[in-house]
Amino acid sequence: MTKAFFVLLKREISSMAGSPIAYIMLVVMSLFTLFVIYGAAVNLEQTSQMNILQLIFRSLPIWFPILIMSPLITMGLFAEEYKTGTIEMLMTAPVTDLDVVLSKFSAAVIFYSALWIPAWIDVIVFQVLTDGAAPIHLAHYILTYVMLILLGMFFGSMGLFLSSLTRSQLLAAFLSVISILVIFFIGLLRYQTTDPFVEDLLGYILIIQHMIIFSEGVVDSRPFIFYLSSTLLFLALTQRVLAVKRLKA
């Protein structure tokens, strides 16, 4: 990492931390996950075969913030720069396109990760209050968080790419949400096919199943391959978009 990267990263994090939207998202996320965790805790009384993490990610409401957080975080990372004209300063500053892309992407992933902290606090508090009646192994915590970060990286890179294509934050958010939903629902077609090849292929993008498997403490290499390779692809595409815009500047 270059010095320019860390300077730009600090700039992006400061910008996010100073935005009222960031605190609104944090409050909404805290209340929403508290509601979901409460529902999972109620269902936990009816089954002894799952821990609370497994029940949380088998609950459909938890997927609402997972699917829309990244578009909300990334929608203005480039679109706002285009709108205000500050992108011109970046294009003429002694920084590379890769520095710009990675700093914005890293800031988005850091903020996305921070939004999940209240949820983890709620789960830990629940464990303390119930005296570990339904114990969760450390591997479950780690793998669940790893899966959430992988999703954040994938969705964040996609949102960053789409934000680099337009001056409109709303359009960037809309395109991101639609793209994520398409991938989410295409994966669900795995349950509708009987063809072994198609079933295995769709297993690579079956997001909800990946989350459930990791929350069970099971490691599957397919999500790592899919999410990391897709993230790198979208970051590379974003860099190419900036390179084209730099030539036109």
Image: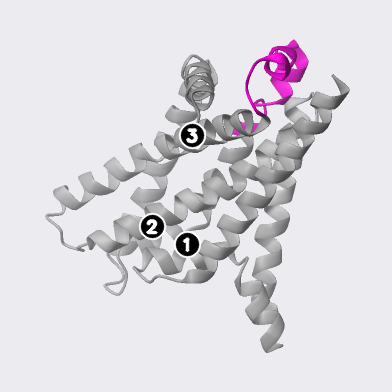
Q: Residues within 10 Å of mark 1 (few under 14, many from 20)?
A: many
The picture places residue 197, in percent across and down from the top left corner, at 69, 85
* Quarter residue 116 falls in: top left
As measured in the structure, the alpha-carbon distance from the residue carrying label 1 to the one carrying label 2 is 7 Å
Q: In the rendered view, does 243 fall on the left or right side of 15? A: right
Secondary structure at badge 2 equals helix
The picture places residue 221, in percent across and down from the top left corner, at 48, 70
Q: Amino acid at mark 3?
A: Met
Q: Dot 2 corresponds to which residue?
A: 144
Q: Dot 1 corresponds to which residue?
A: 211
Q: Residues within 10 Å of mark 3 (few under 14, many from 20)?
A: few
Q: Is residue 142 magenta?
A: no
- The front one of 226 and 56 is 226
Q: Quadrant of the C terminus?
A: top right
Q: In the rendered view, does 221 fall on the left or right side of 130? A: right
Q: Dot 3 corresponds to which residue?
A: 1
As measured in the structure, the alpha-carbon distance from the residue carrying label 2 to the one carrying label 3 is 28 Å
Secondary structure at badge 1 equals helix
N-term mark: 1 or 2: 2
Region in magenta = 73-96
Q: Residues within 10 Å of mark 2 (few under 14, many from 20)?
A: many
Q: Are marks 1 and 2 in contact (CB under 8 Å)?
A: yes
The picture places residue 111, in percent across and down from the top left corner, at 47, 32
